[in-house]
Amino acid sequence: MKAWFCEELKGQWRQSVPVGPVLVDQQSDFQHIQVYETEGFGRMLVLDGKVQCTERDEFTYHEMLTHVPMLSHPEPKTVVVVGGGDGGTVREALRHPGLEKATLVEIDPQVMEVCRQWLPTMAKGLQPDPRLEIVTRDAAEVIGSLPPQDIVLVDSSDPEGPSEVLFSAEFFASLKRALKPDGLIALQAGSPFFFGPQIAAARRELEKIFRFVRPYLVAIPTYPGGTWCLIAASDAHDPQALSLEELRLRRQQRGLELRYYSPEVHLGSMALPEFVREL
Ligand code: SPD
């Protein structure tokens, strides 16, 4: 008889994945950390019962969270990743050859240890690199003390429970203060089916403080509902207003060979279905 891992969301949805024996099952000071071997998606990281990433489909999320804002910027030299202790987002950021400094601010050292051991394709981003600094602290406390950045990427868990603070007006204001005047942020905002009010609230708050606020969508089969909303924002660069030619040129100049992101997908991901646009 097969074992199944089951994620339940808000009493409205359950998704199940056939799994082998659990490889990691531990409680850190912050959360319950599990890693499973799955039959179809490789190894899977689960935090507090929610799927964070699998080896097979993590590229969709990490590429879109990272490259949409980074290619919207003409020359990103500095990036801060908030959360993202698995290393996938910072791995993608470090692929931009002009990047001089990446700072990963992750509160839970145990997540990074587990991913180094069990999810090396993602934790590649955590390997020693002269451009990388890892700060094991609460981002809400640290963000104000960092020098102004070109890019800030918020790779949090869902907008409820411990991560709720990362969706507050105060935290958004601190992200803006952490940016250079022409910087960009991007954050994960949740499923438009299950987190509609939270996405709407995040968009409203961001629109109070940024000139350009662009929600965009990415397909992630192992997240509930399969469609996920990310938001990019900036005062200087409109991620939707770049031409295909400019995006193609930037991708080529930076030598990026990607599996999900393309300039066409970049612009297409911002064409929102009506129910998302109305949020
Ligand atoms: N429903 C889970 C959403 C989690 C988003 N963050 C994932 C972290 C991957 N680096």
Image (cartoon, rainbow, N blue to C red):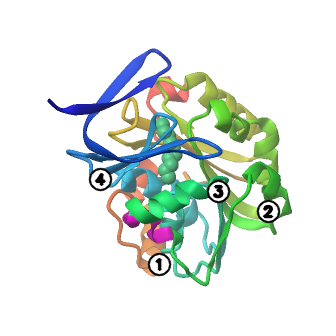
Q: Position of residue 108 (x, y in %)?
A: 63, 53
Residue range of the region highlighted in magenta in the rendering: 120-125
Residue at horizontal 74 percent and vertical 67 percent from the top: 149
How many residues crowd mark 2 within 10 Å: few (<14), some (14–19), many (20+)?
Answer: some
Residue at horizontal 33 percent and vertical 27 percent from the top: 15
Residue at horizontal 56 percent and vertical 64 percent from the top: 70
Cα separation between marks 3 and 1 = 27 Å
Q: Position of residue 117 (x, y in %)?
A: 42, 64
Q: Comparing marks 2 and 3, which lies closer to the viewer? A: 3
Q: Position of residue 147 (x, y in %)?
A: 81, 69
Q: Quick one: SS at disc 3?
A: loop
Disc 3 vs disc 1: Cβ atoms closer than 8 Å?
Answer: no
State the residue lying farthest toward the left.
1
Q: Comparing marks 4 and 1, which lies closer to the viewer? A: 4
Nearer-N-terminus badge (2/4):
4
CB at disc 1 and ligand 1 closer than 8 Å: no
Q: Comparing marks 2 and 4, which lies closer to the viewer? A: 4
Does the magenta segment cover residue 182?
no
Cα separation between marks 1 and 2 = 23 Å
Q: Which mark is residue 254?
A: 1
Q: Which residue is mark 4?
A: 56
Q: Which residue is mark 2?
A: 181
Cα separation between marks 2 and 3 = 25 Å
Above/below status of 167 relative to 274: below
Q: Quick one: SS at disc 4?
A: loop
